[in-house]
Amino acid sequence: NIGVIYHRKGNDTKALEYQEKALPYARQANDSNVQSSIYALLSEIYLDQNQPSKSLEALFKGLTNVQNVGSKFILVDYYKRLARVYAFQADSGKAYQYQLLAS
């Protein structure tokens, strides 16, 4: 995904653009794995841009796809991401809750 490359290079504007363009194609293909990957990166970018509410929104949209994939590994990754965002927001209760789910 080109969005990943732009994110790694620090160009989050372009990364967001390509991730958002990729999402309809993943939906059309009914590919839950790719959708969950797109939402995870969107969440990371939003958090890097100090937009934790958008980060959470992306994660919760992606969580449905993660559950459809059925991969415990991806689910644990999502729980860790949720814990990280809640910690960023200084919501230690929810951060702890998701960290427990991840372990």
Image (cartoon, grey):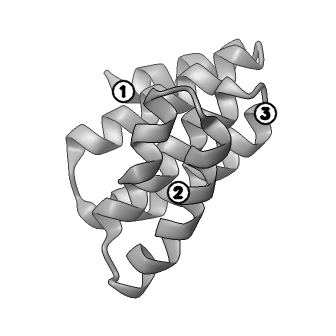
Say few, some or many: other residues with alpha carbon within 10 Å of mark 2 (under 14 / 14 to 19 / 20 or more): many
Mark 1 vs mark 2: which is more N-terminal? 2
Q: Amino acid at mark 1?
A: Ala
Of badges 1 and 2, the one in the foreground is 2
> Which residue is the site of mark 1?
102
Along the viewing direction, whichever of 98 and 11 lies nearer the viewer? 11
Where residue 31 appears, as percent x and y from the top left, is: 31, 74
Say few, some or many: other residues with alpha carbon within 10 Å of mark 1 (under 14 / 14 to 19 / 20 or more): some
Of badges 3 and 1, the one in the foreground is 3
Q: Amino acid at mark 3?
A: Gln
Q: Is residue 33 above or below residue 78?
A: below
Where residue 103 appears, as percent x and y from the top left, is: 31, 21
> Are the two marked residues, 1 and 2, in contact with CB atoms closer than 8 angstroms?
no
Query: Can you tell which mark lies on residue 51?
Result: 3
- Determine whether the residue tagged by mark 3 lies in a helix, strand or loop: loop
Taking the image as shown, residue 103 lies to the left or right of residue 65, namely left
Rounded to the nearest angstrom, the CA distance separating label 3 from label 1 is 23 Å
> Which residue is the site of mark 2?
19
Q: Which residue is painted at 61% across and 47% down in the image?
A: 14
Q: Which residue is painted at 78% across and 33% down in the image?
A: 51
Q: Which residue is painted at 68% across and 13% down in the image?
A: 92
Residue 83, image quadrant: top right
Where residue 100 appears, as percent x and y from the top left, is: 42, 21
Mark 2 vs mark 3: which is more N-terminal? 2
Q: Is residue 21 above or below residue 8?
A: below
Of badges 2 and 3, the one in the foreground is 2
- Determine whether the residue tagged by mark 2 lies in a helix, strand or loop: helix
Q: Is residue 2 above or below residue 56?
A: below
